Image (spheres, rainbow, N blue to C red):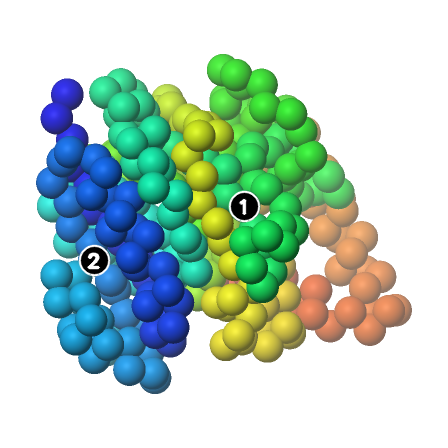
Amino acid sequence: MEHSISVILPNYNGRSLLLSNLPSIVTALENVECDFEIIVVDDCSADDSVDMLQKEFPFVKVIVNEINQGFSYTCNRGIFSAKNSILCIVNTDVTFTPDYFTNGIRYFDDANVFALKGNIINYQNSIDEVVSIEKTAQLYIKHGFLRFNKKVDYVPNSFTGEIGGQFVLLGCCFLCSREKAIELKGFDEIYSPFYWEDSDIALRALRKGYGLIYEPLCVVYHKASSTIPNFRSSTKIKLVSNRNKFIFSWKFLHGSKQWLNHIFYTLINLSVRWIILDWKYYVAFFNAFTRFLIFKLKLLS
């Protein structure tokens, strides 16, 4: 089957990261005999990312948001602008190994495959300072919330989308079918500006019956904490992450047992968190509730 690739990079103030990592993407693409394009969607950067791209990488297609919109919206502009059959959605802080696409593209001969993830090697200052390697995870419930256990061994054919099944956390780099990404309407923008949207689209795909692939030969290096933490306070990050944890659970919990478990623990937390002055829990819950309600009403209108 003949394939083509569109690489989509959401960018916010990532000039130095683009300069460092774009060449590795180009090299990996040139090692595959297929048509390709690179799209950078700039989320209203304050640095000179756009000018640099036009000067140093004139072959890159640049789309610019007029205002800062967040990860989901920015990626969706790239998804719906791309022209090729396979998408690679990747953060600017990721370095590709030369055979990444060579090892991954063949899986899309299977029409049921939605997305593929490889090994994401997280490092600190240099690629020799490895912090962790992201592989697969297990979906489970604890204290009323859906969560992921990353300390599990990969079990083939175990991606079910159900509690106890394994899961591919798509994270900062993955390949996917453009056709299916559009069918799924891209990332859910309810999670903007960041976090949980990648898990959401993967779980939606699984529960729709599409396949996820884990291929450890597809390797990228990810510089940890080099994007969001550089531009957001730790308080903001925690509030958004906790808000989106509520939203993710509300979207995917099913059955009376799961919901009763969630309601039980949520009511307990709402009753006692004030004792330890955990105001962030209340703000996250309120923000999640109002945002979830607003998005539901938009869908109904």
- The answer to whether mark 1 and mark 2 are in CB contact below 8 A is no
Q: Is residue 34 above or below residue 51?
A: above
| Residue where numbered disc 2 is placed | 39
Q: Nearer the viewer, residue 276 or 130?
A: 130
Residue farthest to the front, as pictured = 128
**Residue placed at 52% from the left, 16% from the top?**
156
Q: Which mark is residue 237?
A: none
Q: Is residue 133 visible?
A: yes
Quadrant including the N terminus: top left
**Residue placed at 44% from the left, 50% from the top?**
172
The location of residue 128, given as percent across then percent down, is: 59, 52
* 10 Å crowding of disc 2: few (<14), some (14-19), many (20+): many
* 10 Å crowding of disc 1: few (<14), some (14-19), many (20+): many
**Circle nearer the viewer, 1 or 2:** 1
Element carrying mark 2: strand
The location of residue 98, given as percent across then percent down, is: 34, 41
**Residue placed at 64% from the left, 37% from the top?**
150
Looking at the rendered structure, the kind of residue marked 1 is Ile
Query: Which image quadrant for residue 263?
Result: top right
**Residue placed at 23% from the left, 38% from the top?**
31
| Residue where numbered disc 1 is placed | 121
Query: Marks 1 and 2, Cα distance to the nearest angstrom?
Result: 24 Å
Q: Earlier in the sequence, mark 1 or mark 2?
A: 2
Is 205 left or right of 138, judged from the image as shown? left
